[in-house]
Each structure stands twice: as C-alpha cells, then as structure tokens.
Amino acid sequence: MFRAALLVSGILICPIISASADEKADSLGRPALFADAAAPATSKESAEPSVYAPPEQTSLWKQDALLGSWGDLRTSLDGAGFRFSGTYKGDNLGDFAGGLRHRFAYIHNIDFNLTVDGEKALGWTGSTFFAQVFHNNGGSFSQYAGDAQVASNIEAGQFTKLYQFWLQQDLFDGNLSLLGGLYDASSDFYTSRSSSAFLNSTFGTGKELAQTGLNGPSIFPNTALGFRVRAAIAGPLVLEAAAIDATPGTADNPFAPSFAVDARDGALLLGEVAYIIDGGPESAELYTKISVGAWRYTEAVPAFYENGYSEESILRGSNRGLYCVAERQITSSLALFVRGGFAPQEMNQFGGSLCAGVMINAPFAGRDDDQFGIGIAYAENGRAFRSAMDHSGIRTEAAELTVEGTYRLAVAPWLVLQPDIQYISNPGTDPGVFDAWVGGMRLEVRL
C-alpha cells in the first residue's frame, strides 16, 4: 500500500519538477495566465473586445489541504466559526538489522477534527468547542525491533473512536483559560515544538510518565475526562494544572471512549510552570521555553519487591514524578531542545528518561518548509525492577538508547514525505536482543 502511495505521489510530483521555473504569479498566488485579468484597462484596451477571464482557481499543489475548499463550502463554514480539518499519517517502517525479526509493517492513522469558534457561531465570547475522531489500523513495529520507547508515535491497537471532545473558555483577554472534557494531556504538558517532528514516541511524552497508569495516562492512544486551567501569571510565565481520570477507557477496553468517572480509579494530577517567549514569525524575539512540571496519581499502586511485584495488600505507594523541558530557537533556522523526567523506581520499570536534539528548518536553499533533525533518547531501568528481574533469573540491561535522524520533505502545503532512520541500543533492555536499525518513510497528508 505504501509503495502504491509513493508511486502516485511520484506521478503527481513529476509535472511540478518539469514545469518552467520562470512561471510567475500575482500577489494573490494566481497563475501567470490570469495574473493581469483584474488589472484596469487602458483606453486602447477598452476599445478592444472584452476577453472572458476564467474564475480564479488555486493549483492543487498550492492549496493548504488535499481536499481543497469543497467548492468554497469549507471557506464559508470557517467564516461562520466551523473549521473542519484532518490528517492522514502512514508509516512504512521496519527492522532491517538486529532486533527480533527483520520485517516491515505499515501503520496508518487518520483523524478528523471539528473546531467551533463560539463567538462566530453562537456569539459566545471566548469559547471554543473541539471534537476529534481517530482511526488506527493497529500495526506494530516494536514487535520486530523489540524496543521499549516505541519507534513510531502512531503505533497503537486497532480502533476507531472519539478521541477528544472538550469545551474551552478563555477569560480576561486570554490570560485565563478553562478546559473540560475528553482531553489529551500531551497537548499542554511535557511539550516542546522542535521535538514534535520526530517519529519515536519518547520525543512526545517521556517514557517515565508514558508507562504509568492502568491504561496509560491520558495521551495517545487513550484519553480520559479531565479539567485543565491555564493562566498567564506574570509576563512570559504561564501556569497550568489539570485533574484527569486516572484510567482512560475502561478496565476491559482501554480504547473505549469513556464519559464516566469511577472514584475508585482516582485521578492523575498534573502541574507545570513555564517561561515562554514567543514573538511569532514576524518578531525579532526567538522562541524560548523553559518549563518544570510534576505529576501524581491519587490512588496508590503496588511496588516492587526483590522477589517480584508486591501484592496490593502488602505494599502500596503513590506514583508521582517530575520533568523539565528546555527549548531554544538559536536562529531562525536552528532550534535545540533537552527534556527529561524522573519517576519512583520502586514502582516503575523506567526510573527516568532523557532526550535531546537539534532541528534545522529550511536546511537547503529553496526548501523553506523542510526540516532536518537529529535526536537522542535514553530510558533507564529502575534499580528495584532490575533487582526483581535478577531474582527471577532474568537479566536486563541498564537502559535503552535510541538515536533518530529524520527529514521532513514538504512536497506541497498538504503533503509531507518523511524518511526516517533509528538506531536502537539494547532494545527493550534485553541483553539477548541485538542492537536494531529501524528505518522507512512516513507519508503525511493534510486533508
């Protein structure tokens, strides 16, 4: 399927490459053929018979989305406060050296979104409604590479579900924001702009937090009901806090959307304070973010003993942790980031994670929308986990290390091809698994 997609993309791209580089467009981006159609006529021109000017059309390769404006219906709805969007992502990755098996797999993920501007649509100032539906085909690469940090950030089980469904109210000129509903916490907490282009999951939410909870925290692929407050407290300082149901989905089906809250599940509490400078693309101030966050589950969880996992009635503790993010746009084209976090080693396999990287925007002349990045991610086993495994006769390595190189090739505003390669040392911290090389391509289409 992926090869077919690449073939179709190649057929469509070829006419662009072969087109004349001298073709010009007017200030509105119209083809040169119609660039002067709206220009005022001179007295000589007015004496000539009028020539029919075709209606303005936007080239497929210049429009923002593959499906265009739906005959201007999409544009009209957007003006009325109803914005529809969607993205298709397809990863064709595989293990071609080391790991568990030398196999390729294709994963695809598609989302459809509706954003409603409450002021435009209903006259409700400061309100935003958001709904998002996800479909995932359920493929897996980690079953071949054997890695723990997960090579693809769209790897999940097979599901089609309502993923997010929330209402946000902004107050005091946007200095205070309240949000409630089915909510992905990774959209606000533990975030960094420049790391989001990488494919490996740990460049999103750190492994020490992503591993927690019965069905994971409220991040992809499972979300839960929650409430979030964000406040700009002093200039560039921003404070965020959230309380989210600790068990996304249900105990039997983590992929099920759940609008019920069971008090026995407890809650996941998150808080973050961030120093953010973001003057926007037209500002001389380059983007900077430094943030420190903390999280805690209100319900206790079992802990490790030397002889394995404890019984609930024997020893329980509160799962909690800290993380920090530092990101700096060094120049208009160069950004650096460092992220890391810690979790209690007595109740989590991974006691900490650390990742860092560099992202280069417009790496080549004439490729203003391309990106090239190199990142490194490290997840370390906790001492209690290793001791329990040793007692059971299972050897483990201290940590798993991943190095990723990726290039986002912007073929059109709506089409990105992203070749990617990852070197994984100690996959799954299993000494019996050879270091793995994982590589392939992501196809990303804005619908």
Image (tube, rainbow, N blue to C red):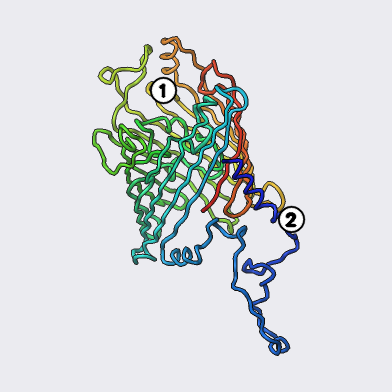
Q: Is residue 398 above or below residue 65?
A: above
**Can residue 152 be seen at all in this image of the molecule?**
yes
Whether residue 281 is situated above or below residue 394 in the rendered picture: below
User: Residue 259: x and y, percent?
Assistant: 29, 44
Identify residue type, mark 2: Ser
Whole-Å distance between the Cαs marked 2 and 1?
58 Å
Q: Which mark is residue 429?
A: none
Is there any visible trace of residue 331 in the rendered image?
no
Which residue is located at x 54 percent, y 56 percent? 65
Residue 284 in the image, given as x and y percentages of width and height: 60, 56
Q: Residue at x 32, y 46 (%)?
A: 227
In the foreground, 405 or 252? 252
Comparing 344 with 367, the one in front is 367
Density class for disc 1 (Cα within 10 Å; few <14, some 14-19, many ≥20) is many
Relative to 432, residue 318 above or below: below
Characterize the local packing of mark 2: few (<14), some (14-19) or many (20 or more) Cα atoms within 10 angstroms.
few
Q: Which residue does the numbered mark 2 point to in the structure image? A: 18
Q: Which residue is mark 1?
A: 345
Residue 31 image offset from top left, x and y in percent: 66, 67
Relative to 406, is 340 on the left or the right?
A: left
Q: Nearer the viewer, residue 282 or 140?
A: 140
- Of mark 2 and mark 1, the one earlier in the sequence is 2
